[in-house]
Image (cartoon, helix red, strand yellow):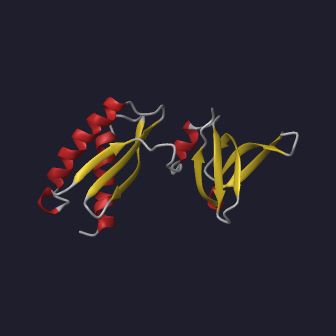
Protein backbone atom coordinates (compact mmCIF):
# COMPACT_ATOMS: atom_id res chain seq x y z
CA UNK A 1 0.00 0.00 0.00
CA UNK A 2 1.38 3.41 -0.89
CA UNK A 3 2.64 5.49 2.02
CA UNK A 4 0.16 8.28 1.27
CA UNK A 5 -2.78 5.91 1.51
CA UNK A 6 -1.42 4.41 4.74
CA UNK A 7 -1.19 7.92 6.22
CA UNK A 8 -4.80 8.61 5.20
CA UNK A 9 -5.90 5.30 6.78
CA UNK A 10 -4.03 6.04 10.01
CA UNK A 11 -5.49 9.56 10.15
CA UNK A 12 -8.99 8.11 9.69
CA UNK A 13 -8.44 5.47 12.40
CA UNK A 14 -7.00 8.08 14.81
CA UNK A 15 -9.83 10.54 14.10
CA UNK A 16 -12.38 7.81 14.82
CA UNK A 17 -10.52 6.90 18.02
CA UNK A 18 -10.64 10.55 19.17
CA UNK A 19 -14.34 11.02 18.31
CA UNK A 20 -15.48 10.47 21.95
CA UNK A 21 -13.05 13.24 22.99
CA UNK A 22 -14.13 16.37 21.05
CA UNK A 23 -11.49 18.51 22.78
CA UNK A 24 -8.68 16.55 21.05
CA UNK A 25 -7.82 16.44 17.36
CA UNK A 26 -5.31 14.95 14.93
CA UNK A 27 -2.73 17.46 13.70
CA UNK A 28 -0.42 15.30 11.59
CA UNK A 29 0.66 11.76 10.76
CA UNK A 30 4.18 10.94 9.56
CA UNK A 31 5.79 7.65 8.67
CA UNK A 32 9.55 7.15 8.53
CA UNK A 33 11.03 4.58 6.12
CA UNK A 34 11.51 2.24 9.10
CA UNK A 35 7.69 2.16 9.57
CA UNK A 36 7.95 4.42 12.59
CA UNK A 37 4.52 6.07 12.77
CA UNK A 38 4.32 9.46 14.46
CA UNK A 39 0.87 10.80 15.33
CA UNK A 40 0.58 14.37 16.56
CA UNK A 41 -2.52 15.04 18.67
CA UNK A 42 -3.43 18.42 20.09
CA UNK A 43 -6.21 19.66 22.32
CA UNK A 44 -8.06 22.90 22.80
CA UNK A 45 -6.36 23.11 26.21
CA UNK A 46 -3.35 20.91 25.52
CA UNK A 47 -3.10 17.14 25.99
CA UNK A 48 -2.10 15.52 29.31
CA UNK A 49 0.59 12.84 29.10
CA UNK A 50 -1.74 10.16 30.48
CA UNK A 51 -4.14 10.80 27.58
CA UNK A 52 -1.29 10.49 25.07
CA UNK A 53 -0.31 7.16 26.63
CA UNK A 54 -3.92 5.91 26.44
CA UNK A 55 -4.25 7.09 22.82
CA UNK A 56 -0.97 5.34 21.96
CA UNK A 57 -2.13 2.01 23.38
CA UNK A 58 -5.55 2.27 21.76
CA UNK A 59 -4.18 3.26 18.36
CA UNK A 60 -1.49 0.57 18.43
CA UNK A 61 -4.16 -2.10 18.87
CA UNK A 62 -6.27 -0.60 16.08
CA UNK A 63 -3.31 -0.43 13.70
CA UNK A 64 -2.44 -4.07 14.39
CA UNK A 65 -6.00 -5.02 13.46
CA UNK A 66 -5.92 -2.91 10.30
CA UNK A 67 -2.92 -4.81 8.85
CA UNK A 68 -1.45 -1.68 7.25
CA UNK A 69 2.13 -2.94 7.59
CA UNK A 70 3.51 -6.34 6.51
CA UNK A 71 3.71 -8.65 9.56
CA UNK A 72 2.59 -5.66 11.69
CA UNK A 73 6.19 -4.46 11.56
CA UNK A 74 5.80 -0.87 12.82
CA UNK A 75 6.44 1.30 15.84
CA UNK A 76 4.19 4.06 17.09
CA UNK A 77 4.74 7.40 18.79
CA UNK A 78 1.80 9.56 19.86
CA UNK A 79 2.67 13.03 21.09
CA UNK A 80 1.47 16.59 21.05
CA UNK A 81 3.21 18.88 18.58
CA UNK A 82 6.07 20.70 20.27
CA UNK A 83 6.84 24.39 19.98
CA UNK A 84 9.19 23.60 17.10
CA UNK A 85 6.25 22.31 15.03
CA UNK A 86 4.42 24.88 12.91
CA UNK A 87 0.71 25.52 13.40
CA UNK A 88 -1.22 23.57 10.77
CA UNK A 89 -4.88 23.77 11.70
CA UNK A 90 -7.36 26.56 12.37
CA UNK A 91 -7.98 25.09 15.84
CA UNK A 92 -4.31 25.46 16.69
CA UNK A 93 -4.40 29.14 15.80
CA UNK A 94 -7.55 29.60 17.92
CA UNK A 95 -5.95 27.99 20.96
CA UNK A 96 -2.91 30.27 20.61
CA UNK A 97 -4.78 33.60 20.46
CA UNK A 98 -2.98 36.00 22.79
CA UNK A 99 0.42 34.33 22.30
CA UNK A 100 3.38 35.67 20.37
CA UNK A 101 3.84 34.02 16.96
CA UNK A 102 6.35 34.21 14.12
CA UNK A 103 4.79 34.05 10.66
CA UNK A 104 6.98 33.19 7.69
CA UNK A 105 5.45 34.34 4.42
CA UNK A 106 5.80 32.66 1.04
CA UNK A 107 8.50 35.20 0.07
CA UNK A 108 10.44 34.11 3.21
CA UNK A 109 9.90 37.45 4.96
CA UNK A 110 8.84 37.19 8.58
CA UNK A 111 6.35 38.99 10.78
CA UNK A 112 6.28 38.62 14.53
CA UNK A 113 3.57 39.68 16.92
CA UNK A 114 0.75 38.73 19.23
CA UNK A 115 -1.98 36.65 17.60
CA UNK A 116 -5.20 38.65 17.98
CA UNK A 117 -7.62 36.65 15.84
CA UNK A 118 -8.05 34.04 13.11
CA UNK A 119 -10.75 33.67 10.47
CA UNK A 120 -11.08 31.21 7.60
CA UNK A 121 -9.12 33.64 5.39
CA UNK A 122 -6.65 35.53 7.56
CA UNK A 123 -4.80 35.99 10.82
CA UNK A 124 -4.54 39.30 12.63
CA UNK A 125 -1.45 40.06 14.68
CA UNK A 126 -0.27 43.01 16.72
CA UNK A 127 3.30 43.92 15.85
CA UNK A 128 5.64 46.26 17.70
CA UNK A 129 7.31 48.45 15.06
CA UNK A 130 9.97 51.13 15.02
CA UNK A 131 12.33 52.33 17.73
CA UNK A 132 9.43 53.39 19.93
CA UNK A 133 7.86 49.92 19.57
CA UNK A 134 4.52 51.31 18.48
CA UNK A 135 1.69 48.80 18.19
CA UNK A 136 0.51 48.06 14.66
CA UNK A 137 -2.31 45.69 13.73
CA UNK A 138 -1.49 43.57 10.67
CA UNK A 139 -3.76 41.22 8.76
CA UNK A 140 -2.14 38.34 6.86
CA UNK A 141 -4.00 36.16 4.37
CA UNK A 142 -3.60 32.48 5.19
CA UNK A 143 -2.76 31.68 1.56
CA UNK A 144 0.32 33.94 1.90
CA UNK A 145 1.70 32.01 4.91
CA UNK A 146 4.47 29.45 4.50
CA UNK A 147 4.35 28.50 8.19
CA UNK A 148 3.60 29.89 11.65
CA UNK A 149 5.33 29.00 14.89
CA UNK A 150 4.56 29.96 18.47
CA UNK A 151 7.40 31.97 20.04
CA UNK A 152 8.83 31.11 23.42
CA UNK A 153 8.65 34.17 25.66
CA UNK A 154 10.49 34.31 28.99
Q: Image quadrant for the C terminus? A: top right
Residue closest to the far right: 132
Q: Is residue 108 left or right of residue 63?
A: right
Q: Quadrant of residue 51?
A: top left
- Position of residue 48 measured from the top left corner of the image (x, y, whole percent): 38, 30
Image quadrant where residue 56 sits: top left
Q: Nearer the viewer, residue 152 or 59?
A: 152
Front in this rendered view, residue 59 or 113:
113
Residue at image point 28% right, 62% down: 6
The residue sitting at 32% across, 44% down in the picture is: 78
Say above or below: 106 vs 90: below
What is the quadrant of the N terminus in the image? bottom left
Foreground residue among 100 and 44: 100
> Is residue 73 found left or right of 3 in the rendered image?
left
At 18% from the left and 61% from the top, the residue drawn is 69
Residue at 31%, 29% (x, y): give it: 50
Residue 40, given in percent of the width and then of the height, sits at 39, 46
Amino acid sequence: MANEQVIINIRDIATEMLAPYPEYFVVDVRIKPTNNVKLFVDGDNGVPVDKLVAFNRNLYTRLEGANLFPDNDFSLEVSSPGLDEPLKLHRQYVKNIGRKIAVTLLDDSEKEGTLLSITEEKVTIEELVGKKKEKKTTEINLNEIKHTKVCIVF
